[in-house]
Image (cartoon, rainbow, N blue to C red):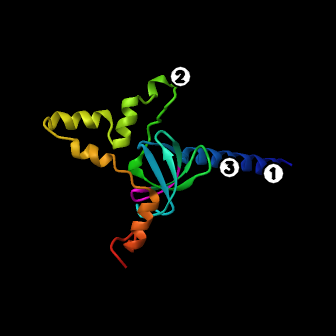
Amino acid sequence: MNRCFKKKTTLVILMVLISFTALAAAKIMSVQVKEGHLRVSPSFLGKIVATLPYGSQVDVQEETGSWAKVSAVSGGSTGWMSVSALSSKRIVLNPGAADVEQAASSRELALAGKGFNAQVEGDFKATHKNADYAAVDKMERINISPAEVDSFVTEGRLTAGGGAQ
């Protein structure tokens, strides 16, 4: 009976260690751009399967180069996202009393849509005092749908490796 008890105890300890290892391996990140596109493959030419808004949390399952295979913490969506669209910082959009220090301001939300944060923009403006953003603002108003991108990729016979086939 003593031997059976040792085996059961060893099994329980092993299961606990595996559980802790799995929890430690979980990597939760936040979408830090206005819209994070989940794609079927790790490529900007990969078809978009879902779009996650700024602040959405994702569970990183694996990383390949500058891409991460993620699943939305809220459930349902899984795909590849550029790691440049992700942040290890937790982004809180509607803070409760405990989360108020982590809350994103409306300015941060606007800057996230442009791919900037307040520090990056401040540093750039400090060193480029005469910069004219009119052309950038005009380009940001251009909205191309995923269907238009898919059509462009198909008609141009583009592949993830680049160029026409």
Q: Main secondary structure of the magenta part?
A: strand
The residue sitting at 60% across, 48% down in the picture is 22
The mark lying in front, picked from 3 and 1, is 3
Q: Is residue 66 visible?
A: yes
Mark 3 near mark 1, Cβ–Cβ under 8 Å?
no
Q: Which residue is mark 3?
A: 14
Q: Which residue is mark 2?
A: 98
Q: Nearer the viewer, residue 120 or 14?
A: 120
Q: Is residue 43 visible?
A: no
Name the N-terminal-most of marks 2 and 1.
1
The residue type indicated by label 1 comes to Arg
The residue sitting at 16% across, 40% down in the picture is 131
Name the N-terminal-most of marks 3 and 1.
1
Name the N-terminal-most of marks 2 and 3.
3
Disc 2 residue crowd, few under 14, some 14–19, many 20+, Cα 10 Å: few
Callout 1: SS: helix
The residue sitting at 45% across, 58% down in the picture is 146
The magenta segment is 60-67
Callout 3: SS: helix
The answer to whether residue 13 is magenta is: no
The residue type indicated by label 2 comes to Ala
- The x, y position of residue 88, in whole percent, is 44, 41
Callout 2: SS: helix
The mark lying in front, picked from 2 and 3, is 2
The residue type indicated by label 3 comes to Leu
- The x, y position of residue 139, in whole percent, is 29, 49
Q: Which residue is mark 1?
A: 3
Work out whether 126 lies above or below 44: above
